[in-house]
Image (cartoon, rainbow, N blue to C red):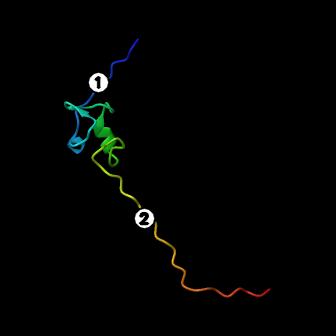
């Protein structure tokens, strides 16, 4: 027994993606939910932003405590 999923139409953020077939996403049933928290993970037209970590800057050496 196959379950038929109802697909929701794409949202404006989906425009330009290669995964669109007509007015629907070929991967996700509810594309609006994928854009709710940020960029869709399957979006082909959005490049992920690389987060550069700040390098530690070492100013000078500290003196060792004598025991």
Q: Position of residue 5 (x, y in %)?
A: 32, 23
Q: Residue at x 29, y 49 (%)?
A: 46
Q: Is residue 21 left or right of residue 67?
A: left
Q: Quadrant of the N terminus?
A: top left
- Residue 50's quadrant in the figure? bottom left
Q: Are marks 1 and 2 in contact (CB under 8 Å)?
A: no
- Residue 21's quadrant in the figure? top left
In the displayed structure, 42 sits above or below 23; it is below
Q: Is disc 1 surrounded by few (<14), some (14 to 19) or many (20+) residues within 10 Å?
A: few
Compare marks 1 and 2 and give the one earlier in the sequence: 1
Q: CA distance from mark 1 to mark 2?
A: 40 Å
Q: Is residue 48 left or right of residue 67?
A: left
From the image, tell me which residue sits under label 2: 52
Residue closest to the far right: 67
In the displayed structure, 21 sits above or below 44; it is above
Q: Position of residue 34 (x, y in %)?
A: 33, 41
Q: Is residue 65 left or right of residue 39?
A: right
Residue closest to the far top: 1
Q: Residue at x 77, y 88 (%)?
A: 66
Q: Is residue 32 left or right of residue 55?
A: left
Circle 2: element type: loop
Circle 1: element type: loop
- Residue 42's quadrant in the figure? top left
From the image, tell me which residue sits under label 1: 6
Q: Of the residues tagged 1 and 2, which is closer to the observer?
A: 2
Q: Position of residue 41 (x, y in %)?
A: 36, 43
Q: Residue at x 46, y 70 (%)?
A: 54
Q: Quadrant of the C terminus?
A: bottom right
Q: Is disc 2 surrounded by few (<14), some (14 to 19) or many (20+) residues within 10 Å?
A: few
């Amino acid at each position: 027994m196959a379950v038929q999923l109802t697909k929701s139409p794409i949202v404006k953020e989906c425009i330009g993606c290669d995964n669109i077939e007509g007015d629907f996403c070929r991967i996700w049933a509810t594309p609006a939910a994928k854009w709710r928290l940020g960029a869709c993970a399957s979006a082909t037209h959005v490049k992920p932003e690389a987060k550069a970590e700040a390098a530690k800057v070492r100013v000078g050496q500290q003196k060792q405590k004598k025991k």
